[in-house]
Image: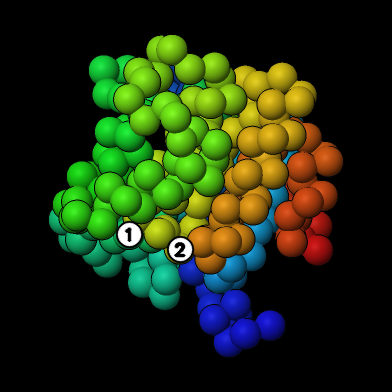
Amino acid sequence: MSEDQGRCVLEACKVSKTFDGPDGSRIEVLRGADLQVYSGTSLSIRGESGSGKSTFLNVVSWLDTPSAGTVWWDGVDVSKLSATELSRRRAEVLGFVFQAYYLMPELNVLENVLMSARIKGSLKRDSRSRAEGLLEKVGLKDRFNQLPGKLSGGERQRVAIARALLNQPSVLLADEPTGNLDEKTADIVMELLLGLCSDQGASLVLVTHNPQYASQTDHRAQLSGGLFNQIL
Ligand SMILES: Nc1ncnc2c1ncn2[C@@H]1O[C@H](COP(=O)(O)OP(=O)(O)OP(=O)(O)O)[C@@H](O)[C@H]1O
Ligand SMILES: [Mg+2]
């Protein structure tokens, strides 16, 4: 293991999240969850529906704030960042792939991938060639000008993977990325996701209900009772 692989790129320390339920009740979803993601490694998260997997991803990406606990991105305590620094660092450190793709319907494939550089404010001449290179790697070389509405689910997810990797994030967070795909397409997308993250040196946090996909990651965690266990 190289020294860089020992670097913690994402860490949750005693993270809790409580939501307000109906009639003044409280829903305690996360109860002091700890998780570490090391540079260049992949980790899968499994857990029953409603166990808090998506909530955890929202909280570690600071799209929602934890009720308690600390989140570190590349050694930086996220709670200490100003709003501007937060957006900038998030765009640098994290990439996202969701079950529902979230592509912009009015933008073509290439423009969708370039959106992450635009959001980060770093659209440069070489962004376009990097976007084209990533699209080629996910097998969409001939589809640069196509609108997402004319793509299959598997193709849309491949665009989303290229978009997530454009900024060379330290960590890619994927929330059930194959949840809308048939088995064969899901296998292809998963192979691309694992292969590309490894090629690009991005760590992967993969939320999946599929035990076979979970077994392909370097580390595995189970979320239950608001805590992670069984990290192997
Ligand atoms: N904004 C919110 N307000 C109140 N309750 C919420 C909110 N967001 C999530 N919850 C509750 O938190 C719990 C965990 O939800 P979450 O979406 O994180 O589960 P999950 O593990 O991702 O499930 P799935 O596998 O079905 O995607 C659920 O009981 C959900 O109803
Ligand atoms: Mg979920």
- Tell me the SS state at disc 1: helix
Categorize mark 2 by other alpha carbons within 10 Å: few (<14), some (14-19), many (20+). many
Q: Residue furthest top?
A: 150
| Count of residue discs | 2
Which numbered tag is attached to residue 170? 2
Q: Residue at x 54, y 17 (%)?
A: 152
Numbered disc 2: secondary structure: loop
Mark 1 surroundings: few (<14), some (14-19) or many (≥20) residues within 10 A:
some
Tell me how far mark 2 sits from mark 1, CA to CA: 8 Å
Residue at 67% over, 40% down: 190
Using the image, determine if residue 82 lies above or below residue 30.
Answer: below
Of residues 156 and 17, which is closer to you in this image?
156
Question: Residue 191: horizontal and vertical position, in percent?
Answer: 69, 44
Residue at the spot 43% in from the left edge and 12% down from the top edge:
150
Residue 190 — which label? none
Q: Is residue 185 visible?
A: yes
Q: Is residue 223 visible?
A: no
Answer above or below: position of 228 versus 49: below
Task: From the viewer's perspective, tell me whether residue 114 is left or right of residue 163.
Answer: left
Return the disc, 2 or 1, that comes first in the chain's sequence: 1
* Residue 216 horizontal/vertical position (percent): 78, 51
Q: Quadrant of the N terminus?
A: bottom right
Above/below status of 38 relative to 88: below
Q: Which percent across, then down, holds residue 89? A: 29, 60
Q: Which residue is mark 1?
A: 92
Q: Is residue 92 left or right of residue 150?
A: left
